[in-house]
Image: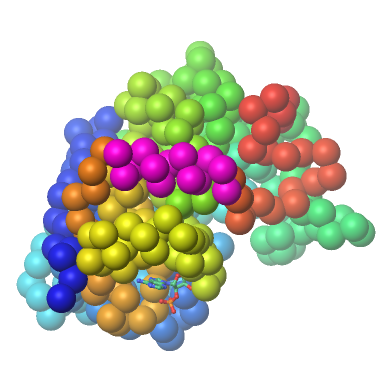
Amino acid sequence: MSAATIHTGYKTLNTGASIPSIGLGTWKAPDDECYNSVLTALRNGYRHIDTAKIYNNEVAVGKGINDFLKESGIPREELFITTKLWGTDCKDPLNALKESLLKLNLDYVDLYLIHWPVAIPNDKGDLMPSNEFGHRLVLPFNEWNYLNTFREMQKLPETGLTKAIGISNFNKSKIEKILNDNECKIKPACNQIELHPYLAQSDLINYCNKNNIIVECYSPLGSTGAPVLNDELLLKLSKKYNVSPACISISWAVGRDTIPLPKSVNPKRIEDNLKIVDLSDDDIKLITENANEKLTRIVNPDWTVDINIFEESDVY
Ligand code: A2P
């Protein structure tokens, strides 16, 4: 029998709101499967669901949430729901949020994130316009950029349509630009980034912690096929703690005070992914050191030829 137990802890955002320490990720969960995974997760004790416009599953996520609220009688306020602004909507986040809420069939979300620090040309409904080389187009920085977008995002909490705003895929220098922007009146509540046992991002986590910005981990198992789960160290620790390698990954994320968002459409795994063990500080450190050696970033869209948005030295 596994030694892991269900984790129902919370952390506190800089808005004062509580956020459940583990959430269900839904990226790459197709519509039909997504409905079942959301319903299964909520029935098993999850209170935190993460989606995005670009995942194209907001309708299914919303149906799962609303069906669960109806059958359980649990009030909406007990759930924490996040969705994200896609770059083509950078100039009008209010309208984009309203469209997402319509799909989700919800009155509000708890957190609304700028999905990527890029502004994308809004070209006849194409969400990922690209040039002749297949590089994804972004608007010139001086025409519109993430600072302009964040200034627009700041107007949203007062509408009541989202309780908090935040960012995703932002590195230190970009966060710094937001925090130093004269027009920045609200701090981002959260930065959602790729984090797993092959990508530790300790500097960025420390920077966010120092600035009271919660860090959420997407792809905490290494995304499709969960490649990090075959790692030798994780296998060794899974024997030591008598839990699965997935549990070690998720426990490591929680142990580092970050919020993992494991995605699964498999009912047994969904149930398992909410269970963690208390890893020793030494073992957390071992996994972090191992991650720094492996250093593998899985999600890195080719936005344009000369922009690698994860480079701290990048001027964009
Ligand atoms: P599935 O949806 O079939 O369960 P990430 O959260 O890093 O994006 O990882 C998602 C990938 O990991 C998916 O391929 C998912 O497949 C798989 N996965 C999710 N939970 C587990 C688990 N507990 N053990 C093994 N694989 C898992």
Q: Position of residue 246 (x, y in %)?
A: 36, 65
Number of marks present in the image shown: 0
- Of 118 and 95, the residue lying toward us: 118
Which residue is more in the foreground, 245 or 170? 245
State the residue in front, 227 or 306.
227
Q: Is residue 9 left or right of residue 216?
A: left
Residue pushed farthest bottom?
Answer: 32
Question: Which residue does the image show at 26% across and 59% down from the upper left?
Answer: 240
Q: How is the image coloured?
A: rainbow
Residue 217, placed above or below residue 261: above
Q: Residue at point 15% right, 76% down?
A: 1
Q: Residue drawn at (10%, 75%), measured in percent from left and top?
A: 72
Q: Please say whether residue 226 is visible from this viewpoint.
A: yes
Residue 75 locus on image (x, y percent) = 11, 63
Write the residue at 27% across / 30% down. 14
- Reply yes or no: does residue 286 show up in magenta: yes
Between 195 and 243, the residue placed more toward the observer is 243
Q: Main secondary structure of the magenta part?
A: helix
Residue ranking furthest to the right:
132
Examine the rendering and report whether any part of residue 35 can be seen: no
The magenta stretch spans residue 239: no
Q: Is residue 65 left or right of residue 217?
A: left
Ligand 1 found in image quarter: bottom left
Quadrant hosting residue 26? bottom left
Q: Quadrant of the C terminus?
A: top right
> Which range of residues does the magenta coloring cover?
282-294
**Residue 283 image point, x, y percent:** 31, 45
Question: Percent x, y for residue 225?
Answer: 52, 73
